[in-house]
Amino acid sequence: MKRSLRWAVMLGALIALVVGLTACGGSSSNSSSTNGSKAGEPTKVDLSAGKKGGKITFLAAADIDYADPGQTYYTFGFMVQQAINRPLYSFKPDDTTTPVPDLAAGPPEISADNKTITVKIRQGVKYAPPVNREVTTADVKYAFERSFSKNVPSGYAGTYFSSIEGTPAKPNTGDIKPISGITTPDKYTIVFKLKAPQAPLVSQALVMPITVPVPEEYAKPFDAKLPSTYDQYVAQTGPYMIQNDSKGKLVGRKPGKQITMVRNPNWDGKATGDYRPAYLDGVTIEEGNDQLEVASRRTLSGNGLMCCDAGSPPAQVLKSALTSNKDQIAFVPSGGTRYIALNTKVKPFDNLNVRKAVVAGFDKNALRQTRGGKLLGDIATGWLPPGIPGFEEAGGLTQGKQYDFDTKPTGDLALAKQYFAKAKAEGVPIGSNGLYNGPDKLLTIATNADPGKKTAEVAQNQFTKLGFKLQFRIVPQDTLYTKFCGVPSQKVAICPNVGWFKDFTDPQSMLDATFNGNNILQQGNVNWPQLDVPAINDAMKAAATTPVGTERNKAWAKINDMIIGQAPAIPWIWDKTALIASKDVKQVPNGYTTVQDLSFSSLK
Amino acid sequence: MLSYIVRRLLWMVLLLIVISFLTFMIFYLLPSADPAVLRAGKQPSPELIKVIREQLGLDKPWYVQYWKYLDRLAFHFDFGTSYQNQVSVKSQIFDRAPATAGLAIGGAIVWLLIGIPIGIISAVKRGKLADRLAMGGALVLISAPVYWLGLVSLYLFSKGIGVWGVFDGAGTYPNDGSNLFNSPFTVAPTLFLPWLVLAASFAAIYARFLRGNLLEVMSEDYIRTARAKGLPERTVIFRHGLRSAITPIVTILGLDLGILLGGAILTESVFNIPGIGRLAVDSIQKSDLPTIQGTVIMGAFFIILLNLLVDVLYAFLDPRVRY
């Protein structure tokens, strides 16, 4: 038996050696450049002509949430929508701040009172088979109406479009009902009348897939079901279409396995003013690639592949690739902020000085290391991330400069103690060492999967260093949101794994849901710190009506400052997503969807 | 025999009902996430959550939900519709079953082809170098988690990312409806590496098990008698020794195969084989209760069925066994 063991150990050591050699194949250097940019800096998008023809396979971990444009609400779903459908407005890959007319024929016309938006659409845009007819504004109207019905529950219709006159407070039951505030004076004009002067926000939100036209006569039988089955029969207007049969059933979508996209025979980009070049003959999305490292390596060494929907490749693969495959990597800002939420309704975080002490004492750099370090993100100093209007007005990468507690990325224990001392004067238990000394264990809910788990563990150490005792629980990410952090009655003190990413590029969409006290919900709450400061709420109400442009950006930048001053959370990273592709693929990242743009990418 | 089989089949039905009930209660009372909130997007309003809850039937009392489920299952063989993609669970399971069956059956053949000869050689060459090598290697393979072994094998032997690109790697299993049974020559190459990985620990266990059994049998009186009669050693081992020693292998083979037919979760995940195991993992991650229940019941069905088959087969292999 002893000899058997010896053999076993030797064999194990041999395997470990081989594996180790394999894994260490690349250098750890990260000083090279990619596509003309310094490593980690957002890649300059190259929109020069690509090669026509060929097919690409995209390696994805999971399926899209929905193919139905009325229901999809996640990045990966948006990526597919961008290729198969035409919303009223969308973003070219190289400009995430100014939407361009897509199905629309020009910019939205906004009335002086900010209560009416008029949009004209292009003529000659046709649906893919089997619908085959021209798109009219009645289809856009129906797309909105169905999204306010019970059968087609949209995740954001109520949030961004409830200011349209006639929208129901609760989703309609029974038949899909008309919305009086949406009218179509002719086949190519649609008018949105608003209850309040909310046109700045609503006009920006017209990039959302809810504006993708839906042909009523075709979709109605599917929408009559509860829930609607249109998701399996989507009518398509983009350069590509998910393969369907003669009845329109999306036979090319096999949930959890594969999505096959082919060219839409009815798409004529030149005639209908579509800015998408659509070089490829087809795209296949291969699902089930949740081994990110395997998928990344396959992509880098294979042909005709792009990756990944589930975040950046692991840091070790990325660092190695930056040395040997740098042209195969592109970096794109994620347009969001990750942060550690401090519940302002739970002691001791109901005390502003305690919160300031925590923000001052935290080593954000250590947190950033858990997501790949500098390469994959800038240290967040506020709540308006790069790429969002208002970012520059808020101070760019150094937001909230006037607050001393938000300036040192590696933390400042001395400053933290100063704030703890102020808190002590307000009755907060502070020990003789100058750190927090409360008796209670603070409920902390963290995710059970890396890299979030690592982040939470680093945060746990730092809270402990500041004197806090935690009741640290790890749960699946979905549980974290749906059962704990999103449910105020759970009284979770610390949520170390939350973050907010753009729906569209407007500062209101970044700050309103997450820090407006009027938006605290008893379930599905996303104002995780439960910040409810009347001055901030009022400022948001006023800024919401400010027209798009510099003044609006300044107004929201000021609100951003006010929020930083309340220290409701520890912002620690403005992510960048690293996208990779095979050597023979010219990948074009889209700054809006933060993944590759299937209509611009091509084979080399 | 017939009455025994009928009795066992009735027990099987009862057991499946109990399993479905337990699964239902676990996910109803202790769900990892609220399926309605999960499907309501990033900013779910209470109204929206309520609507989705109604859509999914989650607003009904648990016993109503369960009864409806049982009614559909028992009288229409309908597992319900996935919360996640609104596709029939039955169609998803049937769509994925051939991939799992191909992996499990092929893997079983590989581990029997490797494990049985090694077990025999180890027993016959007891204490010699071959025995020590085989048993040492077996110990390593038993200790190696399938997940780890799968990744290591990919990095060493798969085309594209392996050091020695010998076999097809992850994601090569076709998604066009081909499977081992309708397109064996296309699909088999994509399964070689998964078969080897899946078979590794099983082969090691079977080899050790067979070795132990064979050593025990070879010391029986009837083996001594056979040798005394002057039979050749090969005949003694294969005709008299192995026949007795291998019978218990059939039992564990049945159980192992039953478990794997319910989904070889880790192997399917590492190699991205779209089988029932992957479906189960995806559905658990998405709190997709109908799909979770469907995969659990299918898994239980195969385990119970294979158990029954093994018991019946036992009567043929061992004349002493009678029902």
Image: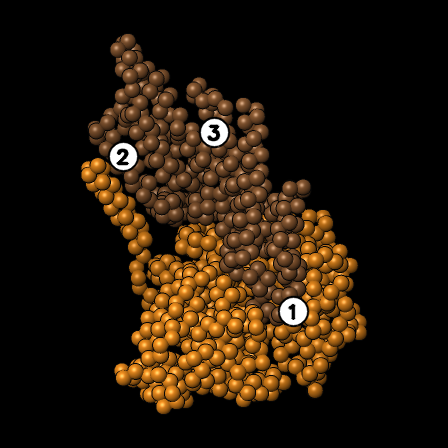
Chain colours: A orange, B brown
Residue A204 in view, yes or no: yes
Q: Name the residue tied to disc 3.
A: B310
Q: Residue at x 33, y 32 (%)?
A: B209
The circle on residue B135 is 2
Name the front one of labels 1 and 2: 1
Q: CA distance from mark 1 to mark 3?
A: 53 Å
Badge 3 or badge 2: first in the primary sequence = 2
The circle on residue A73 is none
Q: Residue at x 46, y 85 (%)?
A: A566
Q: CA distance from mark 1 to mark 2?
A: 63 Å
Q: Name the residue tied to disc 1.
A: B47
* Chain where mark 3 sits: B
Q: Is disc 3 placed on a helix, strand or loop?
A: helix
* Chain where mark 1 sits: B
Mark 3, Cα crowd under 10 Å, few <14 / some 14-19 / many 20+, is some
Q: Residue at x 22, y 40 (%)?
A: A5
Same chain for the residues under marks 1 and 2 in the image? yes
Q: Is residue B291 left or right of residue A171?
A: left
Q: CA distance from mark 3 to mark 2?
A: 27 Å
In the foreground, A579 or B175: B175
* Whole-percent x, y for residue A302 in the image: 44, 50
